[in-house]
Image (tube, rainbow, N blue to C red):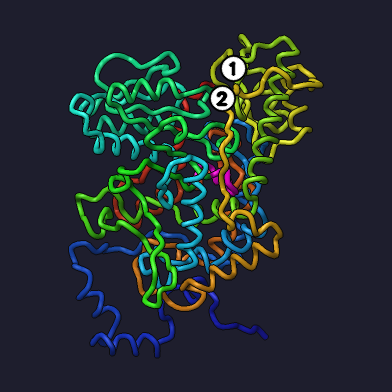
Amino acid sequence: MTVTSASTSFVDRHIGARRQTDIDTMLKAVGYDTVDALVDTAVPKDIRQDSDLALAAALSEVEVLAELRKLAAKNKTAVQMIGQGYYDTVTPAVIRRNILEAPGWYTAYTPYQPEISQGRLEALLNFQTMVQDLTALPIANASLLDEATAVAEAVLMMRRANKNKTAHDGKTVLDADCLPQTIAIVKGRAEALGFEVEVADLSQGLPGGDINGIVLQQPGASGRVFDHSAVIAEAKERGALVTVAADLLSLTLITSPGEQGADIAVGSAQRFGVPLFFGGPHAAYMAVQKGLERSMPGRLVGVSKDNAGVPAYRLALQTREQHIRREKATSNICTAQALLAIVASFYAVYHGPDGLKAIAETVHGHARTIAASLKAAGLEVLHTSFFDTVTVSVPGKAAEIIAAADAKGINLRAIDADTVGISADEATTAAIVADVAAAFGATVADTSEGFALDTAVERTSDYLQHPVFNTHRSETQLLRYIRRLSDRDLALDRTMIPLGSCTMKLNATAEMEAISWPEFASIHPFAPESQTAEAERHGRDGSHLLARVRLHPPLRPGIADRRLARADRGPGS
C-alpha cells in the first residue's frame, strides 16, 4: 500500500494563503469571488505575460539544499591573501548563530518605527560609536553598502558641501594607491555626472589646478602606510575637502583620519566578523566632521527620550532621506546594510578595544614576518611601513610564485609579471606564513625587525571606552546581551510585519542556511576564475531566470560586476 502525505512543497510552507477556506475569507474581505477576478482588477492586461513561465519543476527544501551542496562542492576554497579591501575573518560562533543566522535579526524591518526597533537601533548606535571612535570623527552613519560606493558617496558629498568659490567646481583627485575598484566606481560616477577626476600619487603632493576634494587610502592598495597630515594640510590650504578611505582594524594601530585632519572617513566593516561572501554584501561606514551631517548619506541613529522621560533611540535627521525629501534626498533606505553592520558592531562589542588591538597586532606581526623572511631571501620588499599587506618585487617570477602558492592552497595577488602582493588577516597562522615564504623559495626569518610602523603614524589615542565595548567578554554575557536587544524588537519570529518589502523578512530558513557555508562564504571576489566557476554560473543562471520572469534581456550578475577591475589587478589574480 502506498501512503501519500499532505503536500509539503515550498509554496505550501511559505507563499501566502494556500487553504481554500483562507483564500475565500480573504477574497470576501476585499469583495471578489475568485483570485482571477482580483488579478484582473489589480494587474493591467497589457503588462501580463500570455504564456506560462518556462521553469523547471519546483524542488522541495530538502532537494534544494542537496543541490546547493553539489554546487558548493564545485567551488574551491583557499587561504585568501589577495587583500584589496577583502579579508578573511573569524565570525564568532555566538554571533553567527544568534545574529547572522537568526530570524529575530534578519527578518526585522528597516527601523523607521522606533517603538518596535529599540534593539536594532541600539546595535546600530554601537556601530556608529565604534566608527566614530576608530576614525576620531564626531558623527558616523549606521552603514552604507560597500567601500567603493561609499567613496563615491563621499566624493559627491564633497562636491555638495564645499562652499569655497575657487574649489567648488574643481576636480576630484584620487590617490593612485586607492583600491582599483574604488577608482573604477568613482570614474564611472564622474562620467555620468560630468565632473573631472584625476588619479595622482599624492605622497608626492597635490597636482595643479582647482581641487574640490581629494581621496586618500590608508593603508594603500600596495599596503603602504604613510603620514597623510602634510598632504591633508596642503589640500585644506587650497580649499579642498579631504576623504580618507581607512581600514577599521588598522585604525587600532594607525593614527586616525580625524586626528590627521580629514573631513570624511569611509571604508568597509567587513573584516569585523563578516565573511568574504565572494565580495558582498558587506557594511560600509562613513564618518564626518561637524557641519557635514546634513549632507551625509545613510541612516543616523540618535538618542532621545520617550514620553516617560526614559532614554530611547530613533532615526535622526530623516529629512535627508528619500521617503521625505524625494528627489532632493541625500540618502535613501536602500543605502545601508543593517544586518551586517549589526554583526560588525557585535564583533567590536565582543572583542572590545584590547581584543581588536590584539587581532591587529597579530595580523601586523604576520605581515612583518613575511616581509622579513622575503628580504632575508634577497627579495625586494617595496614598502617598509605597512599594516597587513606586503608588496614584493620578483622580476619575471610572479606567475611562478602565484602557482607555487596555489599548490599550497593559498591565493596571492599578482599585481603584474614582476610584482606580488600578500595580505595577512585574522585567519593567518604561523603555518600559513611558512607556506607563503616557501612559495617564494624562502624560509621563515627569526626576526621581523625593520618593518615596524613609522612612529609618525602610530596611534596613541584611546578608543571604544564606552562600557558596552568593555563588558561582554564571555560568550554567555554576549548571548544574553543579544537576547536582551532582540526582545526589544518586532520581527517575523513574533508576528507579521505589515511594512514594505525592503527587508529579508520573507526569506525561508532553507534559503538562509547556505550563506555561511565556507564554499560560498569564504570565496574572495578576486579569486582565480578556476576556483569560482560554479559561483559565476549560479549568478548567470539567476540572471537568466530573472530575465524570463521580467521579460527583458539577462541582467549582468553582481558577481560579474565585481570583476570589472580584473585588468587592473594583473594576470592570475
Is 306 in front, or is 315? 306
Name the image quarter holding residue 512.
Answer: bottom right
Residue that badge 2 annotates: 223
Kindly identify the residue that appears in the image at 67 percent across and 86 percent down.
Answer: 1
Is 429 in front, or is 250? 250
Label number found at residue 287: none
Q: Is residue 293 left or right of residue 489?
A: left
- The answer to whether residue 39 is above or below residue 46 is below
| Direction right: furthest residue | 446
Tell whether position 279 is magenta.
yes
Q: Residues within 10 Å of mark 2 (few under 14, many from 20)?
A: many
Name the image quarter holding residue 373.
Answer: top right
Res. 421 visible in picture: no
Q: Name the dominant secondary structure of the magenta segment.
A: loop
Residue 87, percent from left and from top? 59, 38
Kindly identify the residue that appears in the image at 50 percent across and 52 percent down.
Answer: 127
Which three-letter amino acid code belongs to the residue tagged 1?
His
Tell whether position 7 is magenta.
no
Residue 510, percent from left and from top? 56, 64
Residue 343, percent from left and from top? 55, 54
Q: CA distance from mark 1 to mark 2?
A: 8 Å
Which three-letter amino acid code belongs to the residue tagged 2?
Gly
Residue that badge 1 annotates: 383
SS state under label 1: loop
Mark 1 or mark 2, which has the lower sequence index? Answer: 2
- The answer to whether residue 274 is above or below residue 307 is above
Q: Residues within 10 Å of mark 1 (few under 14, many from 20)?
A: some
Residue 133, percent from left and from top? 51, 45
The C terminus - image quarter: top right
Name the image quarter holding residue 205.
Answer: top left
Kindly identify the residue that appears in the image at 43 percent across and 81 percent down.
Answer: 18
In magenta, the rendered stretch is 270-281
